[in-house]
Image (tube, helix red, strand yellow):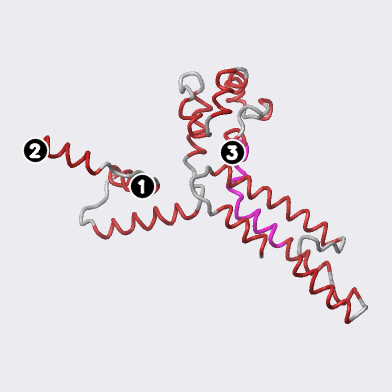
Amino acid sequence: MEHLRELSEELGVSKVFAAAAFDHICTFEVKLNLFQRHIEEKNLTDFPALREVVDELKQQNKEDQKIFDPDRYQMVICRLQKEFERHFKDLRFIKKDLELFSNPFNFKPEYAPISVRVELTKLQANTNLWNEYRVKDLGQFYAGLSAESYPIIKGVACKVASLFDSNQICEKAFSYLTRNQHTLSQPLTDEHLQALFRVATTEMEPGWDDLVRERNESNP
């Protein structure tokens, strides 16, 4: 549970791309495989609380097999692995897009979708873009990437960047939308929905002083 709590905290961090969240998930799945091997070897290094209990019981009872049964704990980890596989299966369908988005200069073109290979090869050969990639965060890098020169890569970036990185954002957006839907007497148009989602999923601070000043100037 402590390992799961750490993962939950990592996934709860906002203002990161979904690709980074998927990295945390993949890393945890590697840990689960390692835990399986350690349990099979009766190595409890990763489970200090369990190790403490087992050591204490060993002092009272010399029959180790009755004290610690690896199969019992391996079954628990196996169920957890299956839950992870089921819960995050949608992300696995776009795994290549996530990897391409997060590390375009190290992604091997032969592993990329056929439609993006030419653009990716051209991107990786561009020294200026490589320098920009090193000094900017991913959002800034893709925002400045030419849509004319790299339309397919830009499209992949927009798709991945638009994914919610945290369920907290989803809950916040849904709650905000529901609250406004009940408050407004008129049906919500597509334009209203777009504006509401923009407000709910970003942290833009309105320039109230500028808005009031412009309003006063237009209505003297």
For the stretch drawn in magenta, the main secondary structure is: helix
Q: Residue furthest right?
A: 62
Q: Which residue corresponds to mark 3?
A: 98
Q: Which residues are magenta?
A: 79-97
- The percent position of residue 161, horizontal first and vertical second, equals 49, 38
User: How far apart are the two marked residues, 1 and 2, measured between alpha carbons?
Assistant: 30 Å
Q: Determine whether the residue tagged by mark 1 lies in a helix, strand or loop.
A: helix
Q: Residue furthest bottom?
A: 60
Give the mark toward the camera: 1 or 2. 2
Mark nearer the N terminus (1 vs 2): 1
Using the image as rendered, state which of residue 132 and residue 181 is in the foreground: 132
- The percent position of residue 159, horizontal first and vertical second, equals 49, 37
Identify the disc placed on residue 219: 2
Direction from residue 133 to residue 158 in the image, left or right: left
Q: Determine whether the residue tagged by mark 2 lies in a helix, strand or loop.
A: loop
In the rendered image, residue 115 lying in the magenta stretch gets the answer: no
> What residue appears at the point 77 percent right and 58 percent down from the top-left corner?
35
Give the mark toward the camera: 2 or 3. 2
User: How far apart are the two marked residues, 2 and 3, measured between alpha carbons?
Assistant: 49 Å
Using the image as rendered, state which of residue 78 and residue 135 is in the foreground: 135
Direction from residue 9 to residue 44 in the image, left or right: right
Query: Where on the picture, by quarter, is residue 120?
Result: top right
Identify the disc placed on residue 197: 1
In the rendered image, residue 86 lying in the magenta stretch gets the answer: yes
- The percent position of residue 115, horizontal first and vertical second, equals 58, 25
**Dots 1, 2 in contact, CB < 8 A:** no
**Dots 3, 1 in contact, CB < 8 A:** no
Mark nearer the N terminus (3 vs 1): 3
